[in-house]
Image (cartoon, grey):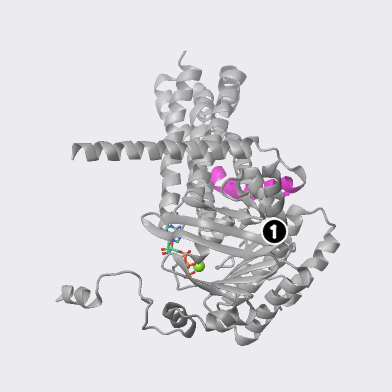
Amino acid sequence: MFVNRLQRLGADTIQTVAGLGRATLMLIGAVFGKPDVRKGFPLLIKQLYVVGVLSLLIIVVSGLFIGMVLGLQGYTVLVKFGAEGMLGPLVALSLLRELGPVVTALLFAGRAGSALTAEIGLMKATEQISSMEMMAVDPLRRIIAPRFWAGVISMPLLAVVFTAVGILGGHLVGVDWLGVDAGSYWSAMQANVDLYQDVFNGIIKSIVFAFVVMAIALHKGFDAVPTSEGIAKATTETVVTASLAVLAFDFVLTALMFGG
Amino acid sequence: MQAREQWMERILSDLMVDIQNLTFSRGERLIYDGMSMQVKRGQVTAIMGPSGIGKTTLLKLIGGQLKPERGDILYQGRSIPKMSRAELYQTRKSMSMLFQSGALFSEMTVFDNVAFPIREHTKLPETLIRTMVLMKLEAVGLRGARDLMPSELSGGMARRAALARAIALDPQLIMYDEPFAGQDPISMGIVVKLIRELNNALGLTSIVVSHDVPEVMSIADYVYVVAEKHVIGEGTPEQLRQHASPLVQQFLKGEADGAVPFHFKAAPYADELMELL
Ligand SMILES: Nc1ncnc2c1ncn2[C@@H]1O[C@H](COP(=O)(O)OP(=O)(O)OP(=O)(O)O)[C@@H](O)[C@H]1O
Ligand SMILES: [Mg+2]
């Protein structure tokens, strides 16, 4: 009884570790494989469109609303202390340091990550991946790598767009609606935002999240049980695991960057 | 020195694929138990057997997508399971497989599907690729369907498009998994003729997996009948028709009652029905 349970625990651990090992090998294969520019470039462009450009709308709309909410909430608190002039830095710092990278990553996991998992899972279920292997074409290079790099390139850019739109949203509510002085909104922002500490760190976060989300989405698709239930399960797992991983990494990165 | 001679001998021998004492299981289920089989160069070798016996699995083993538990699979004298990943990919350039489901790439047109292996493995100019692709599509009667997406094809058409893709690079070994399934009598005729002609004209080696007894008997040079984890009968179509084994005769004649159980292994039917009462 006890031995059985211990055995199962051992088996599960081995399976998990093996799974992680596979994921890592896959990632390394995709990242460090020597790219073939002639064939790889058009594939990358296509994926940049599918993964990046098509996610633009949801990013812009969400960024706008989050910025507007920040403007409203920030104003109601700051105005009590007569500090509504600090609304600009509040909105900008929240977006640059946290909300931009994190919310973008969460939206990206839901929008592009789940789609990638489902797409690759279906390719596996319909033996497209097997048949590619039999044609001596490495599916890691041909299918995984362009999608991976498209995600890693587009996610930080989307986070920048999200942040910029969010700052405009904050302006819309704070300045245009609630009457904060436009000059102080921008100048206080300029004075309090540090290029290295705030902007770069935010972008670094976003790049790390991009690696995490893409690795999880592609691995879940590639490892999916090739049936409709298996793909459904893998898709859900992508969203759940990627979101939790992003939040966990966010804490670690925040502690490293701003904790000291 | 001696090893080298042996190696030369293997290369020059007329065996394309040599399966030795193959043992393989899927999970708990033993699929093959010490099975051996030889595919001669330049011949059409057919593998027949009841559904679910592991024919597709066998082709995947030959292609190196699965690894046997015991035994060896030699392709042109070299062991497939022992190859490194790079060697395996190199070897696969000389073989090709028609998947049972077709497995066309759903994001490309029929034309691009057939052009895919040519574009991947050669640096030919696009005009030449176009000519090659149209030739292959013409051979399977689908030249007019070149701009359709795979989702717009019928099952039989998809299979023929996949066949065109499988022969795109004139490989040395082609494995056909159920090439006749879902074909009407006319396209069936096209496919049968195509497999035979490719084999004769280009001198390649073919492995055909199928249940369609009359078609197989008409094109195969050598036939293996597989059941119960083993080869139960082998020989030229003529020899098989005279085969003494009742199992083989039952399979060739398609009788449901006979030595081979037709059903997947299960508890006795009557017992299961009684359980409900
Ligand atoms: N991915 C898999 N995982 C586990 N078991 C499998 C898998 N694929 C096939 N099997 C099992 O292996 C056995 C052989 O399958 P295979 O597809 O090779 O049969 P087949 O002879 O090609 O059948 P058919 O003539 O119907 O195509 C089947 O009993 C099946 O249940
Ligand atoms: Mg099969």
In percent of width and height, residue A260 lies at 47, 12
Label 1 lies in ligand 1 vicinity (Cβ under 8 Å): no
Q: Chain of mark 1?
A: B
Q: Is residue B259 left or right of residue B217?
A: left
Q: Residue furthest left?
A: B277
Magenta region's main secondary structure? helix
Q: Read off the residue under disc 1.
A: B13
In percent of width and height, residue A76 lies at 41, 29
- Split into quadrants, the picture shows ligand 1 in the one at bottom left
In percent of width and height, residue A54 lies at 60, 50
Quadrant housing the N terminus of chain B = top right
Q: Quadrant of residue B228?
A: bottom left
How packed mark 1 is, by other alpha carbons closer than 10 Å (few <14, some 14-19, many 20 or more), is few
Q: Is residue B30 above or below residue A222?
A: below
Amino acid on which disc 1 is placed = Ser
Q: Is residue A22 above or below residue B124?
A: above
In percent of width and height, residue A186 lies at 60, 25
SS label for mark 1: loop
* Residue A113 located within the stretch drawn in magenta: no
Seen at 44% across and 50% down, the residue is A234
| Residue stretch rendered in magenta on the structure | A39-60
Q: Residue furthest top?
A: A260
Seen at 45% across and 51% down, the residue is A235
Q: Is residue B10 above or below residue B250?
A: above
Seen at 57% across and 20% down, the residue is A193
Seen at 81% across and 53% down, the residue is B123
Q: Quadrant of residue A190?
A: top right
**Can residue B77 be spotted in the picture?**
yes
